[in-house]
Amino acid sequence: SILTKNGIHMSHITIEKRGKAGVIGLDRPKNLNALNQEMIEQISLALDIFEKDHEINRVLIKSNHNKAFCSGGDLKSIRNFCISNNYDKAENFFKKEYELILRIANYSKPYISLIDGLCMGGGLGLVMHGKYRIASEMAVFAMPETAIGFFPDVGASFFLPRMPHNAGYWMGLTGAKVKDFYAHALGLSTHMTISSSISEIFDALCFSKDSITNILDDFCETLKYQTSTLMLAASTKCFDQPTICSIQNCLSNVNSIEAIEALKALKIASPRSLHETMTLLNKTSNKTLSTCLAHEFKAAQRAIRHPDLIEGVRAILIDKDYSPTWPSTNDGKSSILI
């Protein structure tokens, strides 16, 4: 065995061997487990260790606290790189993050996420490309990047366009939060449970001699049929339109709370980010994950060099005045092509 049962506590994650499972615990509570490059490298190291340990036949990833699973990438740090024109460091963050995502997608052992709290942006990157995603009623999923002058990345251009009834366009463009049966219907979770059962499921996955499938069947709810997305019809209405303008026009003619909320989110978001996102989702709807990530890296290179990201992170994550003034509304560069 390479890893002892006492595990390793690194700066922002824990690496532990529990029974037959290798366990990654996200441990940056003050930042709601926001992913920085150090965490990304540490998770990659954990996967290396687990892969070489023949006593480990599955990997679990969870949060070590109940504040959040992962609130996303640490874009405050990215903003600092951008301000100082240190684009190489910013690019390297995304390069490492996307390499980790591809690693998770192709990992040799079952990869299981236990999601019991906020899971946004980079958090979805950690879970969506693994086979098992167990979400409690406390799990909240969102891709809120357009509000901060960025775009849904971490492989979102792979999984968002594949959601039923254009729900991925709705989530990616508006930053809408999804949970419970809605999240399950859209494929964000593969299994549902209640928060109080997470520790019991965790122990069973580590120590039970039963198969992963049987364990999850015993402890979780998984609908044997696709939950009707009619429940989301009011929210996703208009997101089959081909352009941002036509989506907004459609929403403005719909008299519903959902349409009003969606239109408000689109008007607050960075115009440049909306067009970048729409272009990405249209371009990658039938591409492999690897190709999607390559497109996303090019989009990230553009985003870090545009002032919308600096302004959006300031308004939403730093000053929290939620009133960004988007440079892209005046620079004539809102329409982005890949």
Image (cartoon, rainbow, N blue to C red):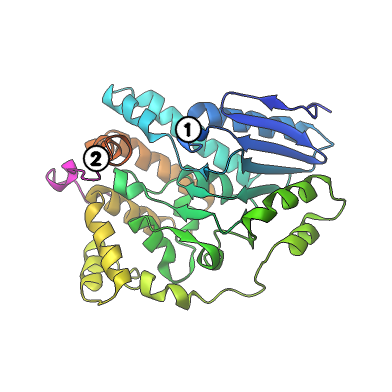
For residue 236, above or below residue 334: below
The x and y percentages for residue 334 are: 20, 49
Looking at the image, can residue 108 be seen?
no
Q: Report the disc number at residue 50.
A: none
Q: Nearer the viewer, residue 117 or 225?
A: 117
Asked if disc 1 and disc 2 are in contact, CB closer than 8 Å, the reply is no
The residue carrying mark 1 is 30
Give the extent of the magenta segment.
Answer: 321-337
Type of the residue with mark 1 = Lys
Q: Quadrant of residue 176?
A: bottom left
The residue carrying mark 2 is 308
Q: For numbered disc 2, what is the local secondary structure?
A: helix
Residue at image point 80% right, 61% down: 214
Residue found at the very far front of the displayed protein: 196
Type of the residue with mark 2 = Asp
Residue at image point 33% right, 22% down: 86
Q: For numbered disc 1, what is the local secondary structure?
A: helix
Instruction: Tell how many labels.
Output: 2
